[in-house]
Image: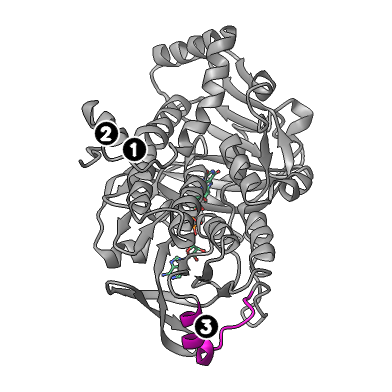
Amino acid sequence: MPPTRPADSPARHTGPSSDQEQEPRRYLMNKGKRVIIIGAGPTGLVAALGLARLGAQVTIIDREDDILRWPRAMVYLPSTLKVLDEIGLLEKAKSVAAWGYEYNLRFPLTGNIGRLNYHIVEDLTPYAYNLHFGQDVLAEMILEEFLKLPGAEMRWKTSFDTIEQAADCVQVSVHTPNGPRTLEADWVIGADGARSSVRKDLGVEFEGFTWDDTFMATNVLYDFDKYGYAPSTMVADPDHWCVIAKIDDQQQWRIAYGEDSNLSEAARLARIKERFKHFLPDPDAPIEVLAANSYRVHQRSAATYRVGRVFLAGDAAHATNPIGGMGFTSGVQDASTLIKCLGGVITGDLAEDALDWYAYERRRCFLQIANPTAIEMKRRTQERDTAKRMEDEQNMFALMADRDATRQAMMSIFNLSGRAYREDWQTTLLVDDQSGKAPTVGAHGGIKIKA
Ligand SMILES: Cc1cc2nc3c(=O)[nH]c(=O)nc-3n(C[C@H](O)[C@H](O)[C@H](O)COP(=O)(O)OP(=O)(O)OC[C@H]3O[C@@H](n4cnc5c(N)ncnc54)[C@H](O)[C@@H]3O)c2cc1C
């Protein structure tokens, strides 16, 4: 089960000051640059570090008492590595992570294995690999750097309550262990996860749908290397599909698979080892389950990612099934775009119009790229129709035989970064986008990009 800290042990990552008495003076000195980030997940933390580095006075609040240790994302795709590089964390990440070059799609129907390797795009990008490490490790890394910066503050055990906006500032009401408080800022980023209270308080719809299936995420100690498993592996099977991915170089791996939504959590946990028999190359080899939890998956997007001085980012803005890693990866890109756009407004280099670009472009990237990609990855992994499974396999091998198509497919992850802001975007990029067919979330959805 996930490791937890005893309730009375102190949080390890706190800001230099949470003294309410100092607030008015501190805030006045930084008028125009004050940012409150709600949620110390990867999205909020990446944005916090980047904005603080640009001179913003950033306060992060989180309702927990320290970094969440549940098993969650742990594969850093090339577009994420580029952002880590931009915020000065790539070298540190490389030193703690396991490295991965190969992605495998296994087809139990025939026993064949589709293989894609990043070496094929080494001349196109310096980020031609994946790194593997838990998002909690990333959080530690970021907080260590963030808390060295002037004005940087991390307030744990502080829950968002409500927001009130005025023309030139935002009041955020929060609950703290010492009672309710009101914080003031110029800008607020709601990065408080898929059940975002910020999004709900703003009255923004979370459009889309929830899948019927339940996903089980387990962290295990098992020697998949010994059996030739690639660091990122998917097994295409209607009943026993799974995603197997490396978490570190000490034989810690993630096995994620589908579970019956009608079972209780206790029943799902009780039959983990029975389910593992279908996924493990040698079910008799020793295995230790370090952590496990199940969760429901969605394809949803907020109707807008900006309401006045408040932005939605990461899972608070969009939710997707995790097959293909589109959730975490998109959240990091949201944060990167906020660093550029909100950071540009704060430093005086960009007009406020850049904030509308953030909202537009990040929503477009989710609806046009992340969402359909994740739906297709899920379909391919779970496909029940034998003819379609055979076709998927043929398509995979046709791709592998075509060097140019493979290179294009592997570089396509950078599309998720979106386009750079330009001042004339409303009369150029937006017009071009609107002249095309409005994208939707697919068969189940109905989400459209609004004009
Ligand atoms: C079990 C599981 C496995 C996953 N596996 C993968 C994977 O393999 N690959 C992948 O790409 N993605 C995966 N994901 C998704 C990925 O973890 C998320 O996309 C990512 O964490 C989103 O980051 P975020 O910062 O936007 O939100 P979160 O990580 O959800 O962070 C939100 C933060 O906000 C805080 N918060 C919430 N409400 C409040 C409030 N009212 N007041 C103050 N603070 C608040 C929370 O405590 C939390 O720290 C997985 C998710 C789960 C649940």
Quick one: label 3, few (<14), some, or many (20+) residues within 10 Å? few
Q: List the residue tagged with mark 3.
A: 26
Left or right side of 367 for 219: right
Amino acid identity at mark 3? Arg
Q: CA distance from mark 2 to mark 3?
A: 45 Å
Q: Quadrant of the C terminus?
A: top left
- Whether residue 123 is visible: yes
Q: Nearer the viewer, mark 1 or mark 3?
A: 3
x, y percentage for residue 199? 32, 61
Tag 3 or tag 2, which sits nearer the N-term?
3
Magenta range is 14-29
x, y percentage for residue 73? 57, 47
- Whether residue 117 is visible: no
Give the label on residue 432, or none: none
Left or right side of 437 for 279: right
In the rendered structure, are the residues bearing label 1 and label 2 in contact, judged by CB atoms less than 8 Å apart? yes
Magenta span includes 347: no
Q: Nearer the viewer, residue 178 or 297?
A: 178
Magenta region, main secondary structure: helix
